[in-house]
Image (cartoon, rainbow, N blue to C red):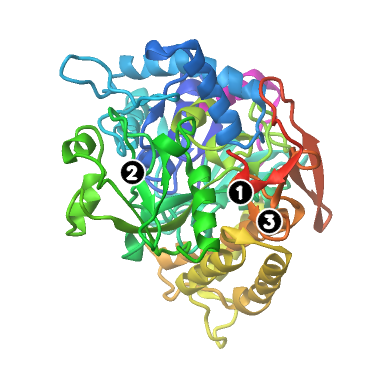
Amino acid sequence: MRVFKTQVVVVGGGAAGCYAALNLHRKGIKAVIVCKGLVGKSGASLFAGNLVLSGRLLGNTEEQARNTAEFLIKYHNQFLIDQEWAKHCGAWIASVYYPELEEAGLYFRRDDDGNMVVSPGKIRSIAANVQGNSGVPFMDMRRKQIIKAGIETIEETVVTALLRNSDGSVAGVFGLQVLTGEYIVVLARATILATGYSDRLHARSTGTREMSADGIAMAWRAGASMVNLEMQWWHTNDVAYPPTWQRMQIYPNPMLGSEKSARMVNSDGEQFFDQQKDDPLAFGPYTVQLKALAKQVHAGKARYTGGYYAGFDHCAPGEVEAYTTYAKVYRQLGMDFPKSLIETAVTAHYRQGGIDVDTTTMSSSIPGLYVAGGVGGHCNGLIALVTYDGKVVADGVADNLSNLREPDLLDQQVKQERDRLETLLYGNDARAEPCAPGELKEAVRALMWEKAGVEKDARSLNEALEDFSRIRRELLPRLRANAPVRAANYDWLDAIDCVNMIDAAELVVLSSLQREESRGPFMRRDFPETDNQNWLTANLLHKAGNGYRFEKRPYNLSMFRPDFSRANNLEVPW
């Protein structure tokens, strides 16, 4: 086992983690990044399609600037957001973020006259390279910046536990280097969790294999509070077949440089959503699309797993291909572009909830533990927003670092975690029939899709809890890797992921039971109304002894507020 010591350890190498480490480096604070995959090459940040224009940037009018703020608060977070954080974030994006990106050499797409190509309408955006591919050059740039700065990285290493000092504060992390099978410990005054979204909890998902809710599970086991875990976002228009292509999208979102968008058509050939006509304010109208689809499902004209279609058959080919990647999917599937419509289906996208934080510092409820990006529960999505988190968390850590204690290496904790991982590799009882990690992962994802998916109710959610109880009782004791090989054993990694997924999925189900309303993408059959009287509130989940307790915390509605008390969620226009 190797032991590292640093001032700050950052867990995660996406947009939030990289920017946090870079800002700490600029402040003269030593940080080490531990990444489950490769820094800048894995996780949600790679999939960023484009970058929203904030404030008065690039010719935004005052109305467009206000529309962007309204979009973030209303359409993108259903008012479950700290509006003061949103205001400060928007100002930073306009004044610092984009100028800094161009200065660093990130190329924003321009037309033949040298003008920046934007999406038209009430909410405007730009793209690095082409729409649908902005995350790749963005994160390539961040990786280069990390290397140039000389920031230490420990890659292809899964962090499995947060270590605690004797006073309960976080002392660093324990991890497994997947390629070598070697254990590591990184001791630090401050630990920043930037593990991203928990997308892989459902059978259909946009997430990569790394996104198994590790941050949520580890933080909860260490005692951190959670917020709004039930608020799952969904893509409505990812390729239905083959299932392995479920991350390839036919977005009915505003197209760069065009007045048109993809359209959605039901099984009877009837168009039921065209973003430019139906909801021009919703720049990324996933929730509005989902509500339109739900009505088709209820009418028997679509399924959440398919039976409806999307495409660009109303567009000229050059209009789509000039600044987007969307035509590539058709050619790879051997389909006639743009005449063909592709059958699409819903996939779990990103989770709006996560670890509860103080948005002025990104500190969690546990001393020494900070959070940045999608694993936090204060805002939903977008690469610029999670990058802002990297800035805020670096400032918060720097301001408080001298008050955080030097970490202890507590041998008993290290032994317990090592023993737990060894059991997942070798098993408890050689005579017991092993439970295959890959099969259990898929069973958990199928369970969540069926009983805690797009639409759910108390009955399905309680059934899910019963299923998880059975899994813990009958399957987890037999969970072990198929081969007792230490190096490059991804079956062992699957076993580690399984435990995290089950821990996090149970919390999601419990939180879903607690929120007795439907709001945006969160749909309960038994509570179909959006209830601003009782549920315009953070849904907080705290540890309490061996159990848990819930608490409500109202939001400060300093800029925007809903204009109704109760309404059918499917008729709410956000």
Q: Which mark is residue 507?
A: 3
Give the mark, 1 or 2, whose residue is nearer the N terminus. Answer: 2
Residue 360 visible in the displayed image: no
Q: Which mark is residue 340?
A: none
Secondary-structure class at tag 2: loop
1 or 3: mark nearer the eye: 1
Give the mark, 1 or 3, whose residue is nearer the N terminus. Answer: 3
Q: Give the mark count.
A: 3
Q: Quarter of the image holding residue 128?
A: top left
Secondary-structure class at tag 3: helix
Task: Identify which amino acid the numbered label 3 is placed on.
Answer: Leu
Residue depicted at 58% across the width and 78% down the height? 478
Main SS, magenta residues: helix
Which span is picked out in magenta?
390-408
Secondary-structure class at tag 1: helix
Q: In which quadrant is the C terminus drawn? A: top right
Q: Position of residue 49 (x, y in %)?
A: 36, 37
Q: CA distance from mark 2 to mark 3?
A: 36 Å
- Other residues around mark 3 within 10 Å, as few (<14) / some (14–19) / many (≥20): many
Residue at the disc numbered 1: 570
Residue depicted at 60% across the width and 24% down the height? 86
Is residue 391 rendered magenta in the image?
Answer: yes
